[in-house]
């Protein structure tokens, strides 16, 4: 999904789109097309895009790997400049502001790319199916929320439980 800027001279434009985004990540997927809405301001040098993304995603519980649904609400503010200007201006007034700078081709803004980037940037570091998720047995891999196993029961250091979830 693109916003075409060639027909937009200096000025502003509101947008509100629902788009399908392929996150291309193993541990998280989008459950339905996400909504992205906001305002675009086209200046002489840069295009400022600010708004919100609402995305319903499914992630794995960091302890027991059960899929967990959650809805992310992400506020974003990104400035687009062309590559040419990026080289010229990166040390000038754009520098140091708390803005994310993206390069664009001077003609269109790719909302799909923008949404994918923002969703991946804003994923929580950890997700839990419930506050007191028991995780997986480190010995037999049983989901301890669903059953107890016969393995030696001792307190599992949560740091080890997390290591267990790393994929190699
Ligand atoms: Zn869990
Ligand atoms: Zn076990």
Image (cartoon, helix red, strand yellow):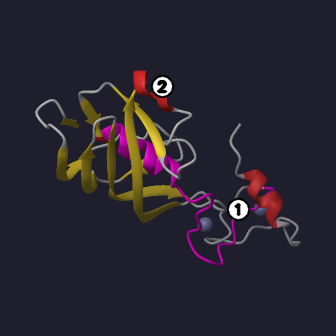
Label 1: which residue?
Answer: 136
Q: Secondary structure at mark 1?
A: loop
Stretch in magenta: 112-139
Main SS category, magenta section? loop
- From the image, state whether disc 1 or disc 2 is nearer to you: 2
- What residue do we see at 36% from left, 57% from top? 55
Quarter of the image holding residue 36? bottom left
Q: Is residue 46 above or below residue 52?
A: above
Along the viewing direction, whichever of 13 and 64 lies nearer the viewer: 13
On whether ligand 1 comes within 8 Å of the CB at mark 2, the answer is no
Query: For the point 62% across and 61% down, which residue is it?
Result: 126
Residue 58 location (% of width, % of height): 44, 56
Badge 2 local density, few (<14 within 10 Å), some, or many (20+)?
few
> Which sits earlier in the primary sequence, circle 1 or circle 2?
2
Residue situated furthest left in the rendering: 7
Residue 163 or residue 3, whichever sits in front: 3
For residue 88, the mark is 2
Residue sitting at the far bottom: 132
Is residue 73 shown left or right of residue 87?
Answer: left
Quarter of the view holding residue 46: top left
What residue is shown at x 23% (from left), y 27% (from top)?
A: 107
Query: What kind of element bears circle 2?
Result: helix
Label 1 CA crowd tier, 10 Å (few <14, some 14–19, many 20+): many
Q: Quadrant of the C terminus?
A: top right
* Residue shown at the point (72%, 56%) measured from the top left: 141
- Mark 1 and ligand 2: say if the CB distance to the nearest ligand atom is below 8 Å: no
Residue 115 is left or right of residue 5, and the answer is right
x%, y% of residue 99?
48, 49
Position of residue 73 measured from the top left corner of the image (x, y, whole percent)? 40, 64
Q: Would residue 74 be counted in the magenta stretch?
A: no
Q: Mark 1 to mark 2: distance in Å?
A: 53 Å
Above-or-below relation of 134 to 110: below
């Amino acid at each position: 999904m693109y916003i075409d800027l060639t027909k937009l001279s200096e000025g502003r434009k509101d947008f509100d789109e629902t788009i399908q985004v392929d996150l291309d990540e193993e541990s998280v997927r989008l459950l339905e097309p996400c909504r992205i809405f906001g305002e675009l301001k086209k200046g002489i040098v840069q295009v400022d895009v600010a708004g919100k993304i609402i995305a319903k995603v499914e992630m794995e519980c960091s302890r027991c790997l059960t899929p967990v649904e959650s809805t992310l609400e992400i506020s974003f503010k990104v400035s687009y400049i062309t590559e040419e200007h990026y080289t010229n201006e990166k040390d000038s007034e754009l520098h140091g502001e708390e803005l994310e700078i993206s390069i664009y081709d001077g003609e269109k803004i790719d909302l799909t790319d923008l949404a994918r980037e923002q969703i991946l940037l804003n994923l929580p570091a950890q997700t839990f199916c419930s506050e007191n998720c028991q995780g997986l047995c480190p010995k037999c891999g049983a989901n301890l929320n669903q059953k107890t196993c016969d393995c030696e029961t001792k307190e599992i250091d949560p740091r080890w439980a997390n290591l267990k979830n790393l994929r190699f």
